[in-house]
Amino acid sequence: MTVTINVIKRILKYSLYPVLAGLVFLSYSNVWVVLATKDYIFKEKSDLAEGQVGLILGTSNKRLDGQPNPYFKYRMEAAAELYHTGKVRHLILSGDNRTKYYNEPQFMRTALLKLGVPDSVMTSDFAGLRTLDSIVRCKEIFGQDEFVIITQEFHCYRAVFIAQNYNLNATAFIAKSMPLHYSLKVLGRELFARTLAVIDLYILGKEPKFYGDKVDISLL
């Protein structure tokens, strides 16, 4: 019995090290991402330069229960506000287009048209499968070295962090979020998403899944 207990203690001891290392890396990654980007993320539109290109990061327009997704609604409202106040002159709608029934850029376009944004100032990026894809394609496909990202605050840090890694001059405008009790699950996922972003950028060297033909939005 004593031998068995000692073996169990040894197993627990050595299995604890990877767990502790993982927690340290998770904490370090999140602190790094936030501290590196916090000065480039703005709540007030008055802090933004005029006439920029805005990049809206996609999310579903519906929740799993079929109800409207407030995160989507608030991103669209923020983007429309920036357009109507002259802070952005053109919007790139970047999101997933996995099936004909799920098309984030088209959902965005429909919502923005209802908010008075002209169709002529919107360009869809149907291959924004992940935040990294949206950021890199904004440069490689749409030719933008400088732009303002539009999403909720928890997402802004990771998005700007990815842009910085590609030497892009990106800022972010914070769209309205939800109360903490509503957002806990999303915020928890974001802690791991930031760590994964560090791994993707500095260890795995991830690239967008799709590139494609370049689009010159200055001509639109």
Image (tube, rainbow, N blue to C red):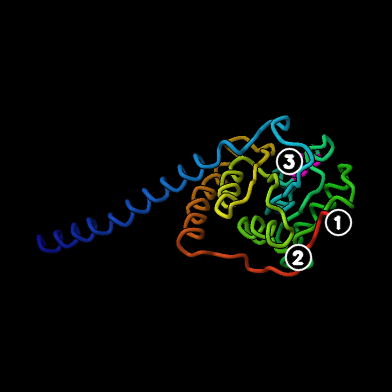
* Amino acid type shown at disc 2: Lys
Q: Which residue is situated farthest in the left direction here?
A: 2
What residue is disc 2 on?
Answer: 214
Q: In which quarter of the image is residue 140?
A: bottom right
Q: Label 1 neighbourhood size at 10 Å, few (<14), some (14-19), many (20+)?
A: few
Dot 3 falls on a residue whose secondary structure is helix
Residue 94: give x, y in percent of width and height. 72, 56
* Residue in the foreground of this view, choosing between 89 and 173: 89
Residues drawn in magenta = 73-80
At horizontal 71% and vertical 43% (from top left) the residue drawn is 70
Q: Label 3 neighbourhood size at 10 Å, few (<14), some (14-19), many (20+)?
A: some
Dot 2 falls on a residue whose secondary structure is loop
What residue is disc 1 on?
Answer: 219
State how many labels appear.
Answer: 3
| Magenta part, dominant SS | helix
What residue is disc 3 on?
Answer: 74
In magenta segment, residue 210:
no
Q: Which of marks 2 and 3 is nearer the N terminus?
A: 3
Q: Distance between the residues labelled 1 and 3?
A: 29 Å
* Residue in the foreground of this view, choosing between 39 and 128: 39
Locate residue 88 relative to residue 148 in the image: left or right: right
At horizontal 82% and vertical 44% (from top left) the residue drawn is 89
